[in-house]
Amino acid sequence: MRPQLLLIGGGGHCAACIDVIELEGKFQIGGVVDVNPDAGQMLGYPVLGGDDRLGELRAQYSHALITIGQIKSTSARIRLWERLESLGYVLPTIFSPRAYVAKSATVGAGTIVMHDALINANAKVGRNCIINTKALIEHDSVVGDNCHISTAAVINGGVVVGQGTFVGSNAVTKQYAKTRENDFIKAGALFTGYINE
């Protein structure tokens, strides 16, 4: 029997995560926890209440995935991560069967790798990240914890993405560039790094 998985956050990103989780087939989605507990359901799965129920729900669910998105700030995802960890939830890594992750790459707990994403040789992706649809993480790159690499963004070879960074859709990083922590790289940008660094 597949483990039951609790989804934390019921917005648009959650809907996209549901599709990936269903296709992967390793977990049975048990329900959704959301700030709007009166929503009723999300794509056929029950909304079980708000964050205040995470403690009591732990008796029924051992696994959880943070399914709120991340654009301007990672604070909500970090806060939820710390709460879920303190309650003893297991935060699994989720891989779309339509993604490709090289054997030599590593991906941390609580990260979701979405449809048609590609993580290449020796790349390292941290915990609690979103590697979104069609994102490319090239060889020897390092993506820190709590990052969102958006749809069709390109992280070229040897790049270091600081923890908490958002890389917008269709943004491209120059090879071996380094971001700062909690950076914001807007959609469509070419990021070449910082002068004198």
Image (cartoon, rainbow, N blue to C red):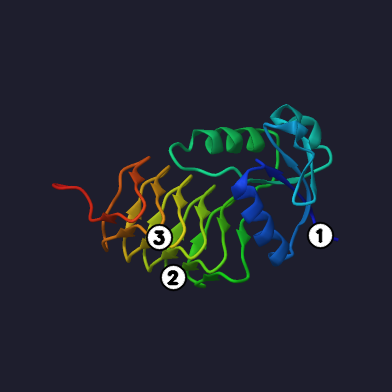
Q: In the image, what residue type sits under mark 1?
A: Arg
Question: Residue farthest to the left?
Answer: 196
Q: Residue at coordinates 61% horizontally, 48% vertically from top-left?
A: 12
Task: First in sequence, mark 1 or 3: give its number.
Answer: 1
Q: Marks 3 and 1: in contact by CB < 8 Å? A: no
- Of circles 1 and 3, the one toward us is 3
Q: Which mark is residue 53?
A: none
Q: CA distance from mark 3 to mark 2?
A: 14 Å
In the image, residue 62 lies at what x, y percent? 76, 45
Disc 3: which residue: 153
Q: CA distance from mark 2 to mark 1?
A: 29 Å
Question: Visible in this render: residue 23?
Answer: yes
Disc 1: which residue: 2
Q: Secondary structure at mark 1?
A: loop
Q: CA distance from mark 1 to mark 3?
A: 33 Å
Question: Visible in this render: residue 92?
Answer: no
In the image, residue 93 lies at what x, y percent? 61, 56
Front one among 103 and 135: 135
Disc 1 crowd, CA 10 A, few/some/many (<14, 14-19, 20+): few
Q: Residue at coordinates 76% horizontally, 30% vertically from top-left?
A: 53
Disc 3 crowd, CA 10 A, few/some/many (<14, 14-19, 20+): many
Q: Residue at coordinates 64% horizontally, 38% vertically from top-left?
A: 85
Disc 2: which residue: 120
Q: Secondary structure at mark 2?
A: loop
Task: First in sequence, mark 2 or 1: give its number.
Answer: 1
Q: Is residue 139 left or right of residue 85?
A: left
Question: Residue farthest to the top?
Answer: 52
Q: In the image, what residue type sits under mark 2?
A: Asn
Disc 2 crowd, CA 10 A, few/some/many (<14, 14-19, 20+): many
Q: Residue at coordinates 56% horizontally, 61% vertically from top-left?
A: 114
